[in-house]
Amino acid sequence: MSSWCVSGSGSIDNHLAGFVTVGGDGYLDQIVVAPEAWGSGVAAELMAQAKRLSANGLKLRVNVDNARAIGFCRKHGFTDAGNDLNPHSGAAVLIMCWPVAESASADPAAAPARG
Ligand SMILES: CC(C)(COP(=O)(O)OP(=O)(O)OC[C@H]1O[C@@H](n2cnc3c(N)ncnc32)[C@H](O)[C@@H]1OP(=O)(O)O)[C@@H](O)C(=O)NCCC(=O)NCCS
């Protein structure tokens, strides 16, 4: 698992602005930006780093009611690749892939959604 953090960016100098974690299998487990840095470009910076860490492709799960995160992912080239349920919470999640949608049954399908 690789992690990448951005700090001191945007308007929150010297504070952690956000982080992204990507598994060796290309599963983007978490991308989180502090609310005060939303829309600042920090998230785009983190997504660019995730793509560098896994240039062959990325997959993630996002809660279907997380419209902002889904919009962010689509803006960065992710496409819908199926629906699933979070095994812990039972919440409906959307599977998204970059650059090309693939089967929702492919690994790491068993991982829980974080967003
Ligand atoms: C997801 C996250 C990293 C995105 O970062 P951000 O700085 O908010 O993203 P941006 O502002 O660059 O892009 C958001 C895009 O979503 C879209 N969007 C925003 N609000 C939206 C809404 N209510 N409905 C639909 N789309 C929306 C827009 O297209 C927007 O881009 P634009 O303003 O350039 O048009 C950040 O919001 C976050 O940390 N959220 C909490 C954690 C989380 O949900 N992580 C994702 C789990 S997979």
Image (cartoon, helix red, strand yellow):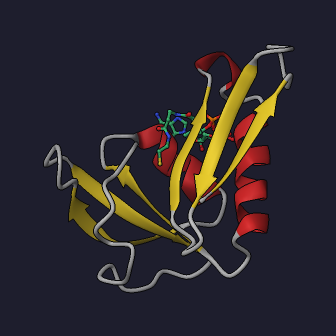
Task: Give whichever of 108, 58 is nearer the camera.
Answer: 108
Residue 31 horizontal side relative to residue 96, left or right: right
Q: Quadrant of residue 18?
A: top right
Measuring from the top left, give residue 44's x and y in whole percent.
74, 46
Residue under the point 39% across and 73% down: 108
Hey, which residue is sitting farthest left in the picture? 90
Looking at the image, is 68 positioned above or below residue 51?
Answer: above
Residue 65 horizontal side relative to residue 16, left or right: left
Measuring from the top left, give residue 14's x and y in whole percent.
85, 14
Task: Give whichever of 32, 44 is nearer the camera.
Answer: 32
Residue 20 horizontal side relative to residue 79, left or right: right
Count how many numbered circles sit on residues in the image. Answer: 0
Measuring from the top left, give residue 33's x and y in whole percent.
62, 31
Residue under the point 62% across and 77% down: 57
Residue under the point 78% across and 35% down: 6
Picture quadrant of ligand 1: top right
Residue under the point 22% across and 53% down: 86
**Position of the N terminus by quadrant:** bottom right
Hey, which residue is sitting farthest front in the picture? 1
Residue 113 horizontal side relative to residue 12, left or right: left
**Position of the C terminus by quadrant:** top left
Looking at the image, is 56 positioned above or below residue 68?
Answer: below
